[in-house]
Image (cartoon, grey):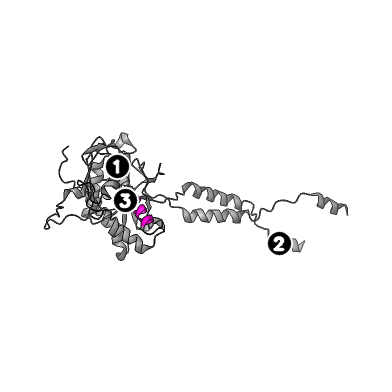
Amino acid sequence: MASKKRDVPEIPSGAMADIAFLLLIFFLVTTTIEADKGIKNTLPPMPDPTVEPQIVNNNNNILFVKINRADQILADGKIIEIGELRQLCKDFIDNNGVNPDWSESPQKAIISLKNDVLTSYDMYLQVQNEMRAAYRELREAYSLETYDTRYDLLDDEKLNEINKNVYRMMISEAEPNVSVVN
Amino acid sequence: MAKFSKKKKEQPAIQTSSLPDIVFMLLFFFMVATVIRQNPLQVRNKLPNATEITKIESKSLTEYIYIGAPKNTAAYGDAARIQLNDAFKNKEDVIPFVEEKRQEKEPKLRNKITFSLKVDYETKMGIVTDVKQELRKAEALKILYSARQRLEN
């Protein structure tokens, strides 16, 4: 009798699982494992008013791409569909002077992008995407041809060589200062 | 003896004493992985799709700028607005916002902040260009056009 009284009653732990489940479900519901992804871009610094803007003498080295308010794309003087843009950019960049109206070499090729105030963001991003895709495909092809390695498996040195010297991405965006006249 | 044979016939109960441990393990995983969204979204935010996607390097060095039409069109109209932190702001507020976010970081990391533009796909470019210009003025040049992964067709 005396020994029974001294026994400390065990805390019932049956409900422990229920409590833990409750917390678990709360966190399950509130969790957003959010990995932000997107197209990286570096904006140009604001132009210095004391420095004259650089003027490119040879207009052939620039591919003018414009998107109007109806989301139509004008590239190289023609209205094209979004699906044609990538190939056009590739041809233009990798022209190497074959077509006299296009770039002399990939190092000199510039893609100029201009959009209207009423262009949709979706179309703008698709165009940016296609331009980047064009560069990526050119780089991948060059990598396979020159180093016999896939582009994503290259070491840093070769990657730098391609990205900075061979196919340096030059996408220029028009200053939005003036009202756009179509 | 009779008692003995009875015990043998009983189905042994499944051990549930380790169940809390298992659940706690899961719980801790989700607690660590959870980011409770501090800023409720006030704008519509359906991101466009893209294929040339990169992941951000560091979550702590990323700040978000939301642009889109307000969710509550009855109260705020349907023109696209900028959301910084948790409230609608004008484009003039972008530079103070950038400064504020810089102050929160360690000095040597201040210029490494990426501003992620989470722009609704239906937004017109006018407001996006305005924000980009403000970011350039604030010398916040690293940006990310937030987008969802689309597979190459």
Determine the residue positioned at 79% across, 49% down: B10
User: Between disc 2 and disc 1, whose residue precedes?
Assistant: 2
- Identify which residue is drawn at 64% across, 54% down: A13
In contact (CB < 8 Å): disc 3 and disc 2 = no
- Residue A54 lies left or right of residue A12; in this view the side is left
Percent across and percent down for residue B80 are 28, 40
Image spot of residue B30 (x, y percent): 50, 53
**Magenta span:** A137-145
- State the predominant SS element of the stretch in magenta: helix
Q: Which mark is residue B50?
A: none
| Gap between marks 2 and 1 measured at Cα | 82 Å
Residue with the mark numbered 1: A85
**Considering depth in this image, is A125 or A105 the residue closer to the camera?**
A105
Indicate the chain on which mark 3 is placed: A
Density class for disc 3 (Cα within 10 Å; few <14, some 14-19, many ≥20) is many
Q: Is residue B44 magenta?
A: no
Residue A130: which quarter of the image? top left
Query: Whole-Å distance between the Cαs marked 1 and 3?
Result: 12 Å
Residue at (31, 40) in percent of width and height: A84
Label 3 belongs to which residue?
A135
Name the residue carrying label 2: A7
- Amino acid found under the numbered disc labelled 3: Tyr
Looking at the image, tell me whether mark 3 or mark 2 is earlier in sequence order. Answer: 2
The 10 Å Cα crowd at callout 1, few under 14, some 14 to 19, many 20 or more, is many
In percent of width and height, residue A22 lies at: 55, 48
SS at badge 2:
loop
